[in-house]
Amino acid sequence: MASTDDNHFTGCQFTTNEGVGLRGGANKESHPAVGVVRVDTNWFGHNGGPAIVARGNSWKITNSKLYHNASERGASIELDRCSYATVSGCDSYLGRTDRDHITVRASKGVNSVGNQIKNNDFRGEYRSAVRCLADADEITALQVHGNTIQNSANAIGGIITRTENGGSFANCSFKDNIFTSTMAGSKINLSAGWVSVGNLNA
């Protein structure tokens, strides 16, 4: 069954969990979460797994602080088979060069459609600010716009995208992001199906 309830988390702390700080949503298009999950002005810190694993539809992750999450596995935020989600106005810090700030995945028969990653601040040591994987399915109309991508320590890359098993990208854009310094790897590494426009210091 699909969930029809809206869920609103504000002013909460999700800290020092061995696993994920906050997880929700369904996995399949046939059973999507149709309510909106609002995560606004929360603190996620020192979780062993991701701060947030978002599945299903219509997550709104805004104005939150993410600090030293995914110390054991995963990324700080995972949009895993998730559509019509927004991540905006967040301050994310990582301290490991084998972790990503945000991952976006389409896999297991589920496309990823219409997600937005906008106006966030990515800092610290990390493998990539945004990493996207289309594994046999399609990521469509993903917008990564207006983010500040800093290298305050040993950051490796900005946005990294890849396809596996016939997966693809369509109508995705990396636009008006700001890089504040050099990186050890690629600032922008995009697959077919992406447009890159107006990025500063790229």
Image: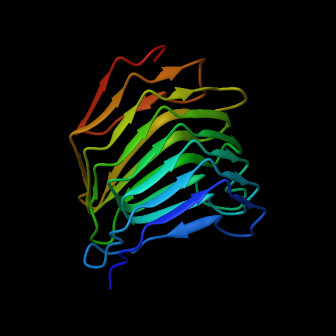
Residue 15, position in %: x, y? Answer: 75, 60
The answer to which of 144 and 109 lies nearer the viewer is 144
The answer to which of 119 and 159 lies nearer the viewer is 119
The answer to which of 54 and 150 lies nearer the viewer is 54
Q: State which quadrant residue 198 falls in.
A: top left
Q: Is residue 135 above or below residue 63?
A: below
Q: How many marks?
A: 0
| 89 displayed left or right of 36 | right
Residue 34, position in %: x, y? Answer: 32, 69
Residue beneath the point at 65% across and 51% down: 42
| Quadrant, the C terminus | top left
| 169 displayed left or right of 94 | left
Residue 76, position in %: x, y? Answer: 60, 52
> Quick check: can you spot residue 156?
no
Q: Is residue 170 above or below residue 179?
A: below
> Quick check: can you spot residue 14?
yes
Question: Please, which residue is most extreme toward the bottom here?
Answer: 1
| 100 displayed left or right of 177 | right
The answer to which of 168 and 12 lies nearer the viewer is 12
Residue beneath the point at 76% across and 55% down: 46
Q: State which quadrant residue 105 falls in.
A: bottom left
| Quadrant, the N terminus | bottom left
Residue 158, position in %: x, y? Answer: 50, 32
